[in-house]
Amino acid sequence: MNWNGDYESVSTLAHELGHTMHSYFSNKNQTYPQSDYPIFVAEIASTINETLLNNYMVDNVKSDDEKLYLLGSYLDLLRTTIFRQTSFAEFELAIHQKIEKGEPLTGESLSALYYDIVKTYYGNDSGVSVVDPYIAYEWAYIPHFINYTYYVYQYATSLIYATAFAEKIIRDGKPAVDKFYNILKGGGSDYPIELIKKAGIDPLSSEAFDLTIAKMNKVMDRVEELVGEKVK
């Protein structure tokens, strides 16, 4: 990885060490054919490290400006992963639906489709925010749409599960950590949904999403509190 000596570098290191930890425990506890874990759980261990690092830093930095930066970084992680990657997934789905209907794909039609989705997600028509026209062409430089199969939604699900597991670890301590090892040690020995169940969350319930949104709201409340103190 690149290292620039800033917080983003530390966060990236924590993220990649999550992958390392996942691979280590999977290789140690599974046979070779079952040690490779599916992408649906691949980003959970890495992202939970980012979340725990951010929590630690917010609790230990000394200035409000540093706390605001860290909290803002975390909110941007939620936005770009849970929110933006979901919009990407909707765009990919819409492309496949057009193909199934026998409709031609052109640069103009893809740009119009992408632009409409982004405007919907950001509330352009309701006046919540303004999406500039050039955003219509953003899809063209995103390699996930070209080089990979339909999978970007898994970034969003992984972050939701990671956030939920982090919240449970902070709240419950060692029992939650011990359950989380079922993912780290599981490799590809079971379906991803079953691995997540064994780790303490039912993927078919709203628990992970609810815990993530509650975490997001807590972060926004803390930002508003710090900004209010600076205004005084």
Image (cartoon, rainbow, N blue to C red):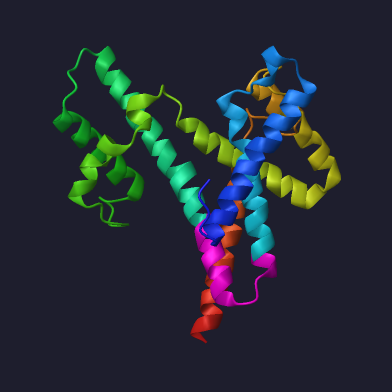
Q: Is residue 201 above or below residue 105?
A: below
Can residue 147 be seen here?
yes
Can residue 210 be seen here?
no
Residue 5's quadrant in the figure? bottom right
Left or right, 133 with respect to 82, comes to: left
Q: Please give the name of the residue rendered at 32% of the width and 26% of the height, measured from the top-left corner.
A: 146
**Residue 113 horizontal/vertical position (percent):** 23, 33
Q: Please give the name of the residue rendered at 31% of the width and 19% of the height, measured from the top-left corner.
A: 96
Q: How many marks?
A: 0
Q: Is residue 41 above or below residue 230?
A: above
**Residue 151 horizontal/vertical position (percent):** 46, 26
**Residue 94 horizontal/vertical position (percent):** 31, 26
Range drawn in magenta? 58-74
Residue 149's quadrant in the figure? top left
The question of residue 47 being in magenta is answered with no
Left or right, 76 with respect to 30, comes to: left
Observer-nearest of 11 and 47: 11
**Residue 179 horizontal/vertical position (percent):** 80, 34
Residue 218's quadrant in the figure? bottom right
Q: Is residue 201 above or below residue 32?
A: below
